[in-house]
Image: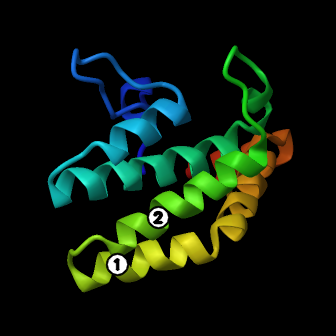
Amino acid sequence: MSYMYVEDLCKLTDENGKRLEYLVDMLEHASQQGSVAEKKGSYQQIGDYSLFVLGMFPESLGQGRRALPPSYYAETGRHGYRVASEVKSALKTTVVFRKLAGKFERCVLSLNWIREHTADPFYQYMLRQFGIT
C-alpha cells in the first residue's frame, strides 16, 4: 500500500477510465471482475483503501454525499482482504491477506497511533534529529 499520490489511492476505474472514489462503487466494480487476477486486485484495493482511510483519515468518513459509518469501512475492508485471500494465488499472499482480514482492527489502531505520533511536534523533532523524515 503506497498512497503518496491520490492516483494510487483510487486505482480502480470504471469502463470509461474514471477513477472510482467511493467504496460502494469499488465493491460493485470488484463483483463484476471476470479474471482471477482482476478480482484479487480489486478486493485487495478495497481492503487497502478501507484500512488507509480508517487508519489515517477517519475524520473524512463523515464528509461528502456518500458518507458511510466507520463500521461499514471496517467490515468492507475485512471482506476485501478475506476475498483476496480466497482467490487462488501464491501461498504467501494468501496468508498475508488472511491475517490482514483477521487483524483488521489492530492494523487500523496501528495506523491511528502512527498518525497521532507523527503529527506531534515532539516526535516530528525527534524524527528529524535522527534523519528519519
Q: Residue 114 occupies which quadrant of the picture?
A: bottom right
Disc 1 crowd rating (10 Å Cα; few below 14, some 14-19, many 20+) is some
- Label located before the other in sequence (1 or 2): 2
Q: Nearer the viewer, residue 122 or 90?
A: 90
Disc 2 crowd rating (10 Å Cα; few below 14, some 14-19, many 20+) is many
Give me the residue at 65% from left, 57% from top.
75
**Is residue 54 shown left or right of residue 78?**
right
Percent of width and height locating residue 92: 30, 82
**Is residue 7 shown left or right of residue 107?**
left
Give me the residue at 29% from left, 24% from top.
14
Residue reaching furthest to the left:
35
Q: Nearer the viewer, residue 131 or 12?
A: 12
Q: CA distance from mark 1 to mark 2?
A: 9 Å
Q: Nearer the viewer, residue 97 or 69?
A: 69
Residue under label 2: 81
Percent of width and height locating residue 130: 62, 55
Q: Nearer the viewer, residue 47 or 119?
A: 47
Q: Which mark is residue 130?
A: none
Percent of width and height locating residue 24: 53, 34
Going by the numbered disc 1, the residue's amino acid type is Thr
Whether residue 125 is visible to the viewer of this picture, yes or no, is no
Percent of width and height locating residue 69: 78, 39
Going by the numbered disc 2, the residue's amino acid type is Tyr
**Is residue 62 shown left or right of residue 49?**
right
How are the residues colored? rainbow
Q: Identify the element where label 2 is drawn.
A: helix
Residue under label 1: 94
Count of labels shown? 2
Whether residue 76 is visible to the viewer of this picture, yes or no, is yes
